[in-house]
Image: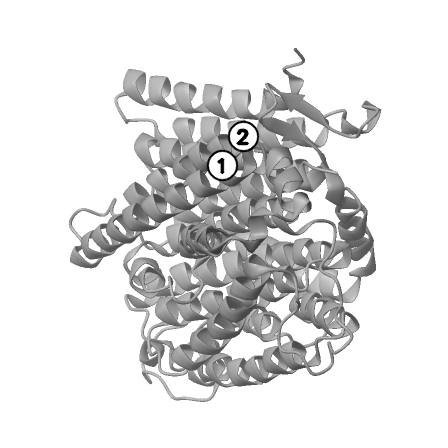
Amino acid sequence: MDWTPIIPAAELTIGILAVIVVDLVGRGRHPWLTTGVALLALAGAAASAVLQPTLEVTDGAQTVLGVLQLDQFSVVFTVFCCVTGFVTILATVRGEAFKTPGGEFLVLILSAVLGMNLLAMSVDLVALYLAFELVSIPGYVLVAMRRADARSNEAGVKYVLFGAVSSAILLYGLSLLVGFAGGTSLAALGEAVAGGAVTTQPLWIVACVMVFAGFAFKVSAVPFHFWAPDVYAGAPASVAGFLAVASKAAGFIALIRVVGAVVGPAVPVAPDALTAFLPEGGALITIIGIAAILTMTVGNLAALRQTEIKRLLAWSSIAHAGYLLLLLTVWSEQAVAALLFYLIAYLFMNLAAFLLAGIVIRERGSGELSALRGFGRRNVGLSLAFAIVLFSLTGLPPFFGFAAKLQLFYVVFERGYVWLGVIGLVNGVISLYYYARVLSSLYFQDGESDAPVMRLSTFDAVFCTLLVVPILGLGLFWSGAWHWAQAVAEDLPLVMGVR
């Protein structure tokens, strides 16, 4: 048995134990030392994932005990989640919540990233569910860590309750899939679906609905999105960013694996695709398509009414989940490439948005849009960085968000589903308004006349620059990242674990 595929997971596990030991020995008096250990573990896991010798294996993938598969897909998401955890820890140091994160906070972040690593490699339904829970449980605690904050406590309770219900629904749905497949592996599920007999049974639709309901909670898709605005608003901005990016990416990792097994290499394009709202790809694709339309629309319309920056970003992240679900609806190799490309853009955009919001809340003492009035004149650099992130989230050129949405809608229209693309574009126009409201507060509304000019520390200035530069750089020179996403998507049969 070759155990090299789980080296990143082993490094994260060692990092968790090391943080606990260092924190106990130092009695919490050396937070920078424990922070350094956690950052080193994340950097080492990401480096190990990149250096995994996947290309030297004849079939392009390695498996451990038949349940964990190492391929380009899992490598990409391991690095993705490690980078998100790394940035979150750094942002927490300078955010509005903790000046020096404690050992328990670092252990929870590392544990969640460990779960994401295992989830990205899971080609077995039992392993996938267990990894999913390892991602979810640390998130519940992270949200409620500020025990003196009533909003944080309320957010934590809501998150746990919604999470417990969705987990039970997901588990029951997966048990039905196991029954149809006659085994727990995605390969067995794919073979059962290819036979065609299981998809004609009414219970198959029930299984698809329940499985998607469990995943929809994690990606905050309508109608399982109710927890997100309250949780994101009650949690520290850095934790909200981690949940909005890494946790949501974990949900899409699992969805890609399951959709690949159930649907196959690609959804067939129907002859009447120009007039059809949804592709003819079976029950799961129909459910995802309906959820995509509802999630985009509800997320954007609800964001129009928000007056608090973290709640606005929460509804925005719900709308972005709808855009990503569009790509699963028109399932194909190009759609997977566009989804990967969009997730990379989403990493930089949403992490930067929440973390910059954390710095603003720390300085202003409030996240209300009214507190941002005139802030553009008090701190030019921070406001400019925020404006770039918001322009990119809107999808305006020349930023990375424009390139990501360009590829997303190109794939949807190229597959022939014009109505889906039109609905997505209309939602993009709606989003212009609420992002413009934030910019209006920053630059075009008068604030306190005697408010002093705010100067960022060197750490904050460098941090903001590192977050924003990729958004602009990859927006101008995105072709290399797109070709890379296409190369990863060519591993699609291995992503599915079947065929």
Q: Is residue 493 left or right of residue 174?
A: right
Give the residue drawn at x 71%, y 70%: 412
Q: Within the image, what quadrant is residue 277 found in? A: bottom right
In front here: 460 or 111? 111
In front here: 97 or 393? 393
Residue at which label 1 appears: 178
Mark closer to the chain start, 2 or 1? 1
Q: Secondary structure at mark 2?
A: loop
Q: Is residue 74 left or right of residue 216?
A: right
Q: Dot 2: few (<14), some (14–19), or many (≥20) neighbours within 10 Å?
A: some
Residue at which label 2 appears: 183
Picture quarter with the N terminus: top right
Give the residue drawn at x 67%, y 41%: 496
Picture quarter with the C terminus: top right
Is residue 13 placed above or below 339 in the rendered structure? above
Is residue 346 placed above or below 121 in the rendered structure? below
Give the residue drawn at x 46%, y 66%: 318
Q: Is residue 269 left or right of residue 148?
A: right
Q: Dot 1: few (<14), some (14–19), or many (≥20) neighbours within 10 Å?
A: many
The tag on residue 109 is: none
Whether tag 2 and tag 1 are in contact, CB under 8 A, the answer is yes
Q: CA distance from mark 2 to mark 1?
A: 5 Å
Q: How many numbered marks appear? A: 2
Q: Secondary structure at mark 1?
A: helix
Image coordinates for residue 123, horizontal then vertical, percent: 59, 33
- Hey, what amino acid is under mark 2? Gly
Image coordinates for residue 86, horizontal then vertical, percent: 51, 40
Image coordinates for residue 480, horizontal then vertical, percent: 82, 54
